[in-house]
Amino acid sequence: MVLLDAYLPSDYLPVVVQLGLALAFVVVTMLVTHSIGPKIKGKVKDEQWECGIESVGDARAPISVKYFLVAILFVLFDVEIIFMYPWAVNFKELGWVGFIEMIIFMGILLGGFYYIIRKGVLNWD
């Protein structure tokens, strides 16, 4: 059983010093950047823009669900492909069992991809 009296406040000194240094770094960095940064203001400078294109319309404009579906599918297949890297690194150690398991994995992956293509999810009208 660990007694609470066993820990002294001096045991936490390195943590407090680290937090103090981190906070000091943030404060000093913000003060220096605000003091030496440019202070030019004007109508053109204060306008909002992104990628050099003027903002037009409402930011809450509806976006097609197909965009989000393609993004989700990309993430899904990207994460599945990540599982192939450890397999490739350990290819020799896994032997034939690992090879057969990867063939099954790739079959399921390609089956899902075939299903997505047959459903027409990636077709944009």
Image (spheres, grey):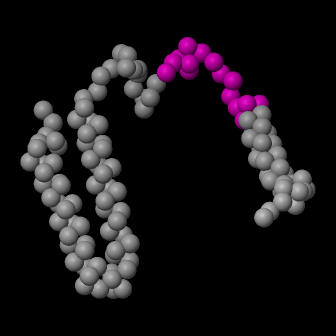
Q: Quadrant of residue 94?
A: bottom left
Residue 96 point in image, percent of width and height: 25, 84
Q: 52 above or below 11?
A: above
Quarter of the picture containing the N terminus is bottom right
Residue 41 forms part of the magenta stretch: yes
Q: Which residue lies furthest to the front in this view?
A: 1
Q: Which residue is drawn at 30% across and 43% down?
A: 71
Q: 53 above or below 5?
A: above
Q: Which residue is drawn at 80% across and 62% down?
A: 2
Q: In this view, does 23 lie to the left or right of 79?
A: right
Residue 74 point in image, percent of width and height: 29, 49
Q: In this view, does 52 lie to the left or right of 83?
A: right
Q: In which quarter of the image is residue 40?
A: top right
Q: How many marks?
A: 0
Q: In this view, does 122 lie to the left or right of 40?
A: left
Residue 95 point in image, percent of width and height: 29, 86
Give the main secondary structure of the magenta stretch. Answer: loop
Camera-nearest residue between 58 and 44: 58
Quarter of the picture containing the C terminus is top left
Q: Which residue is drawn at 25% across and 42% down?
A: 70
Residue 80 visible in rendering: yes
Q: Which residue lies furthest to the top in this view?
A: 43
Residue 116 point in image, percent of width and height: 15, 48
Q: In which quarter of the image is residue 69?
A: top left
Residue 7 visible in rendering: no
Q: In this view, does 98 lie to the left or right of 4?
A: left
Q: Which residue is drawn at 36% across and 16% down?
A: 57
Q: 73 above or below 1?
A: above
Residue range of the region highlighted in magenta in the rendering: 33-48
Q: 26 above or below 16?
A: above
